[in-house]
Amino acid sequence: MTVTIMYGIKNCDTIKKARKWLDAENIEYRFHDYKKDGTDEALFKEWLSSLGWEPVINRRGTTWRKLPEEQRANMDNTSALAAMLENPSIIKRPLLVHDGKKTLGFKADEYENIFK
């Protein structure tokens, strides 16, 4: 059986919507809360390697806006990793891993296609 893992932060509104959708569809998953369960440098490196920093880093959130302008202007995978480890709130949420495929964010129609 495939293990589905959702990564994020419990109090995030988008996480709440995604979890509600998964629960309503009776889809089993494990939720990994960065604040409660911690971060994993090797996992973050793998995400950055396979997806690149641009989609992984949430550039709409307050965490991004609080970064110094120079850091934002010179962001790359290395500096993104440091930012993710220092403050996982900067990671776009949720990051869903199902059948080895990574999906960022939540859209009901996208989740429907994943779990058909």
Image: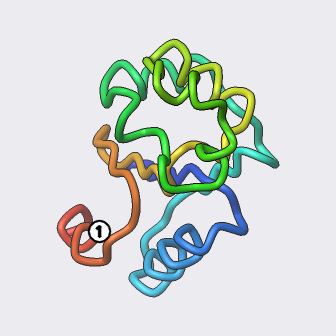
Determine which quarter of the picture holds residue 12: bottom right
Determine the residue located farthest toward the right in the rendered image: 36
Seen at 33% across and 50% down, the residue is 103
Element class at badge 1: helix
x 42%, y 52%: residue: 96
Q: How many marks?
A: 1
In the rendered structure, which amino acid carries the disc numbered 1?
Answer: Tyr
Residue 104 location, x and y as percent?
38, 52
Where is residue 42 shown, x and y percent of the image?
56, 17
Q: Is residue 15 left or right of residue 100?
A: right
Image quadrant in which the C terminus is located: bottom left
Q: Residue at x 55, y 17 (%)?
A: 79
Q: Is residue 43 above or below residue 61?
A: above
Q: Residue at x 23, y 62 (%)?
A: 114
Which residue position is annotated with label 1? Answer: 111
From this viewpoint, which residue is outermost toward the bottom? 24
Q: Position of residue 80 (x, y in %)?
A: 53, 24
Q: Is residue 81 above or below residue 60?
A: above
Q: Quadrant of residue 62?
A: bottom right
Circle 1 residues within 10 Å: few <14, some 14–19, many ≥20: some
Relative placement, left or right, of 27 versus 33 is: left
**Horizontal side, residue 67 vs residue 54: left or right:** right
